[in-house]
Image (cartoon, rainbow, N blue to C red):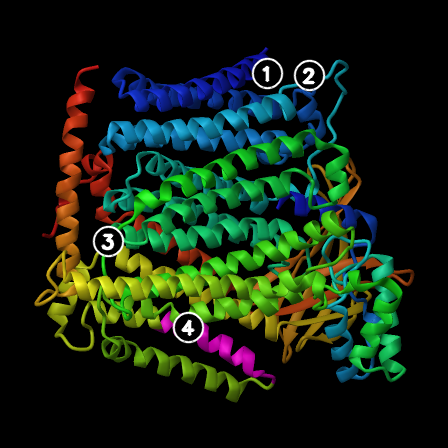
């Protein structure tokens, strides 16, 4: 009964989405206040219905209702409760339901906090959101319905893929979807602006926080996915240039570009049509990411052709959304003319360079990911595009970007002075060079390119610090003035510097991991010791362990240096009897500046185990860097500029946060 | 990521958990071993999804790893060893596809995007500067104000404008 209730709520939500899009578009076109107001209410009702549907599916998972085909295929009664809940979105149908839940949630956010948008504009934004929703509801209802019953319910389910039964991957999809779908808001803003033919500073200010929310969620989602791949797959790596990873990287790159170009619109009412285009492209890439992951096209073009219902439907959504919005753009963009003058050396120019490089990066990932598919479809030839390609093409583009990152914040709008930026930044450049030189001096194997990478990472960090130092006049003013300036410095300035610094931390981790990672393996019997990666590694024992829904072999490995035990590691090898799958659980000991990473293999005939040990220098920097970037985003999001733009939040803020002006 | 997981799960289930190269495959000579690993990282495991033979635990990948090492021991250069594998399995094994008419777009596409983007940006910059010289300064005065002060000015003006655009709506919302 509860499943039927969910099913009905899903259908109702779809109808509400269709109604909301019509009400909003027609109401805004005719200036009918009642219809426009109804659009907002439809958004609330739509969210309520999807929430009911989602809760119903969750209930089915938690109570192991094996009369639902979706639950049978993806759950099992012995699965821990956490993974029963996360199993709701650990499959195609449920994840699509999560997608529309997030979409509807953003819908009510616009309805709730969009009070000081022009009513007509708000109605159009909501209508575009509802239209996207209607397309996805149709997709779910016609091709991916999670509420279908089975006639003859089995006694138990087929279990969730064991690799997904992991905290990292449990929360990766919701965060990633928050990012993907958040870009639908900027898309809706762009489409509404194109319909009205007006983009101004207020539009820029409105788009920025939404982009920021998506960007933060995407950053965290990608980092969480990468972290999961690091500890769960047991390969010692953190980024594999897999199409699925690339699918999330493309929207991230576009969102990063959008984040920066929206600043130019907000501050200077310049780059307007470019920013609108970027907003369309960013969400298009989100849809493409969903399509790539969901249609099965990546596994094989032919698998896609064999079972085309879903793929063709997503392709149709993709064509309608991307094609429709680009046609609208081509038609209306000329209306968005008008920009304010700026000199060659200015922040506008710096942000333009940022956009060109990020777009090139996104295009590179796009080409590398889709090229084998396109070649296969067009010529029937098979080619591979793997990590060596991306390392040779994508990495240099990002290196160029890193060179300019610290300059951006140090250049003034309209007309900046080189001399001033150089004066602010030379200590940062000096620090970067010194760091690279000291690495060259103390590390035995130091290729020039690796040193360049280290220098760039240090340059981004030191550059961010120099930016803050210059803003609070650390080098010239007395401490009282420095403190005063630090207090009035807007949070977005702190946030920007933090995000740029976090990028530098991440780069240091990435460069170090790719150049100085040590991987070694040995076959050990319990009690034996070997020298791996500079450690004396002893396999103490291997013992069986019983988990809630798996059985495991758990090794105890001691790594010691100069006679003292540095770390005791417990890597596991788990077998899930229901699916018959096995997973590795890498054991990681972290010192904060590096990880010791161990994986245990299968026993051989003589009772020996392959023990694989990685020395991963600066691996924690990868996650710390991503976290710092996201924190910078959050800090920027809390800037009072955006609170001014959101009246509900301003009222909620304590009076102590009074303006300093 | 879920797809990735599914893809990986297939191979994890397929073979043993002993991932990638095994200890008994490693060559005695460290420089030769380093060369072998560099080569195997560039070659694709044919039965896997987007994995190099260095990272894969599929039996075919193991065979190819041993083949590459055998070629190096026999005195092949890196290129000869790669060519040997390509001659038998086709260019599909190369994770870095060779530059050919088929892959011109792949290799030079990013460069073209960079060039076009750079050209557009340059035009924009030159144009913006030109209009600046001709049109003077229509917006906030430049002289005498620091960056922060100027920003605050822009901010206040926008706050005012938003207040203006809010007012009629709030009136509208009051009467349902």
Name, please, the residue furthest toward the bottom: A441
Magenta residues, dominant SS class: helix
Structural distance between the alpha carbons of marks 3 and 4: 24 Å
Q: Answer with the quarter of the image where residue A312 lies.
A: top right
In the image, is residue A575 part of the stretch drawn in magenta? no
Q: Which residue in the protein does label 4 denote?
A: A403
User: Residue A380 location, x and y as percent?
Assistant: 78, 50
Structural distance between the alpha carbons of marks 3 and 1: 50 Å
In the image shown, does A421 or A372 lie closer to the viewer? A372
Give SS at disc 3: helix
Q: Which residue in the protein does label 1 denote?
A: A3
Q: Which residue in the protein does label 3 denote?
A: A267
Q: Earlier in the sequence, mark 3 or mark 4?
A: 3
Q: Looking at the image, which residue is at 74% across and 32% down? A: A307
Q: Earlier in the sequence, mark 2 or mark 1?
A: 1
Q: Looking at the image, which residue is at 31% across and 17% down? A: A35
Residue A597 makes an appearance in the image: no
- What chain is tagged by disc 2? A
Give SS at disc 4: helix
Give SS at disc 1: helix
Task: Work out whether A88 lies above or below A255.
Answer: above
Q: Which residues are magenta?
A: A445-462
Q: Looking at the image, which residue is at 52% across and 21% down? A: A53
Structural distance between the alpha carbons of marks 3 and 2: 55 Å
User: Residue A200 location, x and y as percent?
Assistant: 25, 45
Q: Earlier in the sequence, mark 4 or mark 1?
A: 1
Within 10 Å of disc 2 (Cα), the crowding (few <14, some 14-19, many 20+) is some
Depth check, mark 3 against mark 2: the one in front is: 3
Q: Which residue in the protein does label 2 denote?
A: A149
Q: Earlier in the sequence, mark 3 or mark 2?
A: 2
């Amino acid at each position: 009964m509860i499943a039927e209730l969910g099913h009905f709520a899903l259908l109702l939500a779809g109808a509400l989405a269709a109604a909301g899009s019509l009400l909003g578009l027609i109401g805004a076109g005719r200036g009918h206040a009642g219809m426009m107001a109804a659009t907002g209410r439809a958004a609330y009702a739509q969210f309520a219905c999807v929430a009911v549907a989602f809760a119903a599916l969750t209930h089915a998972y938690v109570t192991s209702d094996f009369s639902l085909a979706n639950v049978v295929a993806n759950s099992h009664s012995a699965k821990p409760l956490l993974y029963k809940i996360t199993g709701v979105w650990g499959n195609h149908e449920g994840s699509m339901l999560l997608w529309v839940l997030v979409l509807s949630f953003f819908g009510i956010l616009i309805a709730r906090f969009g009070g000081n948008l022009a009513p007509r504009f708000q109605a159009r934004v909501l209508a575009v959101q509802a239209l996207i929703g209607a397309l996805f509801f149709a997709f779910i209802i016609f091709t991916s319905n999670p509420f279908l019953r089975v006639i003859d319910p089995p006694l138990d389910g087929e279990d969730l893929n064991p690799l997904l039964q992991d905290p990292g991957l449990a929360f990766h999809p919701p965060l990633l979807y928050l990012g993907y779908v958040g870009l639908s808001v900027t898309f809706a803003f762009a489409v509404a602006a194109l319909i009205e033919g007006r983009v101004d500073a207020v539009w820029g200010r409105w788009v920025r926080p939404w982009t920021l929310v998506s960007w933060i969620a995407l950053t965290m989602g990608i980092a969480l996915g990468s972290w999961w791949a690091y500890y769960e797959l047991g390969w010692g790596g953190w980024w594999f240039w897999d199409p699925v990873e690339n699918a999330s990287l493309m929207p991230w790159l576009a969102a990063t570009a959008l984040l920066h170009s929206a600043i130019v619109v907000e501050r200077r009412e310049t780059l307007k049509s470019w920013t609108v285009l970027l907003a369309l492209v960013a969400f298009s890439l989100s849809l493409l990411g969903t399509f790539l992951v969901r249609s099965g096209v990546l596994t094989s073009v032919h698998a896609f052709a064999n079972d085309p219902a879903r793929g063709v439907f997503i392709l149709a959504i993709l064509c309608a959304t991307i094609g429709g919005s680009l046609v609208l753009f081509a038609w209306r963009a000329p209306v968005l003319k008008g920009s304010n003058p700026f000199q060659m050396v200015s922040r506008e120019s710096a942000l333009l360079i940022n956009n060109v490089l990020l777009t090139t990066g996104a295009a590179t990932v796009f080409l590398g990911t889709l090229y084998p598919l396109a070649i296969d479809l067009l010529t029937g030839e098979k080619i591979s595009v793997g990590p060596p390609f991306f390392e040779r093409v994508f990495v240099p583009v990002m290196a160029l970007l890193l060179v300019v990152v610290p300059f951006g914040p140090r250049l003034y709008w309209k007309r900046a002075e080189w001399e001033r930026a150089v004066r602010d930044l030379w200590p940062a450049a000096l620090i970067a060079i010194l760091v690279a030189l000291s690495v060259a001096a103390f590390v035995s194997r130091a290729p020039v390119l690796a040193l360049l990478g280290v220098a760039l990472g240090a340059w981004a960090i030191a550059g961010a610090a120099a930016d803050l130092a210059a803003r609070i006049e650390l080098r010239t003013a007395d401490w009282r003035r420095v403190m005063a300036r630090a207090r009035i410095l807007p949070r977005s300035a702190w946030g920007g510097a933090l995000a740029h610094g976090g990028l530098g931390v991440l780069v240091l981790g990435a460069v170090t991991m790719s150049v100085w990672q040590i991987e070694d393996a040995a076959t050990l019997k319990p009690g034996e010791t070997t020298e791996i990666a500079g450690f004396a590694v002893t396999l103490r024992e291997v013992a069986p362990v019983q988990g809630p829904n798996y059985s495991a072999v758990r090794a105890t490995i001691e790594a010691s240096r100069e006679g003292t035990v540095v770390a005791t590691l417990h890597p596991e090898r788990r077998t899930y009897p229901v699916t018959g799958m096995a997973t590795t659980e890498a054991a990681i000991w972290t010192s904060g500046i590096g990880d010791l990473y161990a994986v245990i293999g299968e026993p051989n005939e003589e009772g020996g185990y392959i023990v694989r040990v990685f020395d991963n220098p600066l691996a924690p920097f990868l996650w710390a860097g991503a976290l710092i970037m996201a924190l910078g985003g959050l800090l920027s999001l809390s800037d009072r500029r955006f609170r001014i733009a959101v009246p509900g939040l301003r009222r909620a803020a304590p009076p102590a946060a009074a303006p300093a002006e | 990521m879920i797809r990735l997981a599914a893809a990986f799960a297939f191979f994890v289930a397929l073979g043993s958990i002993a991932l990638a190269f095994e200890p008994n495959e490693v060559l005695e000579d460290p420089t030769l071993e380093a060369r072998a690993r560099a080569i195997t990282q560039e070659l694709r495991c044919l039965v896997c999804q987007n994995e190099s033979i260095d990272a894969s635990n599929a039996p075919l990948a193991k065979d190819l790893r041993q083949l590459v090492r055998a070629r190096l021991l026999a005195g092949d250069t890196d290129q000869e060893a790669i060519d040997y594998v390509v001659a038998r399995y086709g260019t599909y094994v190369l994770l870095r596809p060779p530059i050919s008419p088929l892959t011109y777009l792949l290799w030079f596409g990013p460069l073209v995007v960079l060039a076009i983007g750079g050209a557009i940006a340059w035009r924009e910059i030159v144009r913006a500067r030109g209009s600046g010289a001709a049109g003077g300064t229509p917006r906030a005065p430049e002289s005498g104000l620091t960056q922060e002060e100027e920003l605050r000015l822009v901010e206040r003006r926008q706050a005012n404008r938003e207040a203006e655009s809010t007012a009629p709506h709030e009136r509208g919302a009051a009467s349902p």
